[in-house]
Image (cartoon, rainbow, N blue to C red):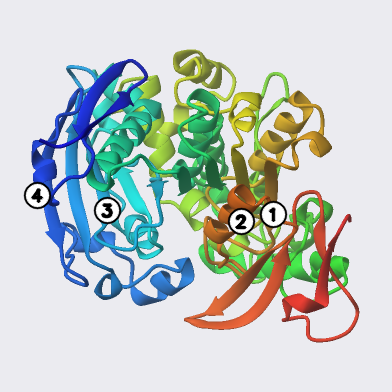
Amino acid sequence: MNRMIQLQAAAVVCICVPLRAATCESLSTLKLPDATVTLAQPVAAGAFTPPDPNSIPDARMQAVRGLPSLRDLPAFCRVALTLKPTEDSDVKVEVWLPASGWNGKLMGVGNGGWSGNIVYPSLSQALARGYAAASTDTGHRGADASFALGHTEKLVDFAYRAVHEMTAKAKLVVAAYYGGAPKLSYWYGCSSGGKQGLKEAQRFPEDYDGIIAGAPANYWTHLMAGDLWPGLATLKDPASYIPKEKYAVIHKAVLDACDAKDGVKDGVIDDPTRCGFDPKTLECKGPEGASCLTAPQVEAARKIYAGARNPRTGAQIFPGLEPGSELVWGPLAGGPKPFGISDSHFKYVVFRDPNWDFRALNFDSDVALADKADDGLLNATDPNLSRFVAHGGKLLLYHGWNDQLIAPRNTVNYYRSVADTMGGASKIQDSIRLFMAPGMNHCAGGDGPFKFDTISVIEQWREQGKAPDQIIAAHLTETTVDRTRPLCPSPQVAKYKGTGSTDEAANFACALP
């Protein structure tokens, strides 16, 4: 008879699992509260084929994100679960367990957008580094919020419950297979995955020992309004539409005005908040041309930079996109339709009307309605992370200054709110740090260095007590590294030392502006 150990599930339910499962297949009989094991299958090295081939990025994006090829994955045990924390829940989870060489740790991986899928690339990345890894579809399939219409519990699953339940069940699966719980657990996510990480730190602070939260969509209700703002600026009145061919014209003018302000002319603006570019400098002197903006286009560009504001009070609802981001304005401002993630939120969550027209959005009353309807459900803005810090948790925030989907100052604002709440930046730097990436787009890509290893950084921070004073980032053209720079803990920036190539990180040092 197998020796048994006691494990805690979902805080209150105690179950018993074998100290060591004899085989991967034997996990199919594992009994878990509110959960069913639907698959327990050994996968040979290099033999995994994703159910959806479109979920795996092409070779270039694999290189950009540092993802392994599926052909290079080690052998593992693939466990699939269906979780039903409520009668209306249908949460799919996969847990991947290295067949050998387990590093003793668990990594939960985040989603993007409305998050209706298992994230196989991130599972692959964690597995290749020796982690047991877990991913969830957050309780629905698909890329919009239509699932939430008439299904309040499914919205709760998406908001936070699915990730927490996934984490609790994954720890039980790990313990059953290896004979002991993971010694440490980490979270890795960007965008919606960044928000999920912050929600964990705020609501379930003991789930993870280290959290990597990139470009977090944490002020969800205001982000949804903020991402419709550029579309309304350019699409509501046809005269205001900025043709995509003019993005490069605006971008060049921005670089001409601000690129050299950091002491290095390199096609990247180190700190866009110090730029102060006014698109009126591009206003056409006569008829509209390819290299100038009409007066309505100037005003539209100004609105994109300024960000959403309440028309009655003038209060900032959400920050605008930064100077330097112009080449990637298309998703929010390029039309012909509004940004789908935000449009979907107002249709299915706020107004519960699939026929709602984004042109009717009122940035006063409708944003207030969205906040009231949310009441902290989707938003992850609580600045008090004292419980997370108290158990030794480390939070690594990062955001690209050229982000075209989530305005980067949102993360700066959140970090400052945490510092203010917890006694100042000096009080939190041992546990919480923010790294801004000049020239980086949403989560990856862009004119600036955008590839960096946050997993190694947080491992060293949490396990060795080595707080990151800089993170070396690389820029890739196709798959070739052609520039490296240090990313610095906010509010520091990378300053050129005055000698040597400006494409080599060693010639820069982190210092206050």
Where residue 28 appears, as percent x and y from the top left, is 9, 41
Q: CA distance from mark 1 to mark 3?
A: 28 Å
Q: Callout 2: helix, strand or loop?
A: helix
Q: CA distance from mark 4 to mark 3?
A: 12 Å
Identify which residue is drawn at 24% across, 40% down: 93
Question: Taking 297 as reference, is 168 above or below it?
Answer: above
Q: Which amino acid does the dot numbered 4 rest on?
A: Glu
Towards the viewer: 166 or 367: 166
Q: Earlier in the sequence, mark 4 or mark 1?
A: 4
Where residue 483 appears, as percent x and y from the top left, is 65, 79
Residue at image mark 4: 25
Disc 1 to disc 2: CB gap under 8 Å: yes
Which image quarter holds the C terminus?
bottom right
Residue 460's tag is: 2
Identify which residue is drawn at 40% across, 45% down: 110
Q: Earlier in the sequence, mark 4 or mark 3?
A: 4
Q: Callout 4: helix, strand or loop?
A: helix
Question: Taking 8 as reference, is 431 above or below it?
Answer: below
Q: Which amino acid does the dot numbered 1 rest on?
A: Lys
* Figure label count: 4
Residue 416's tag is: none
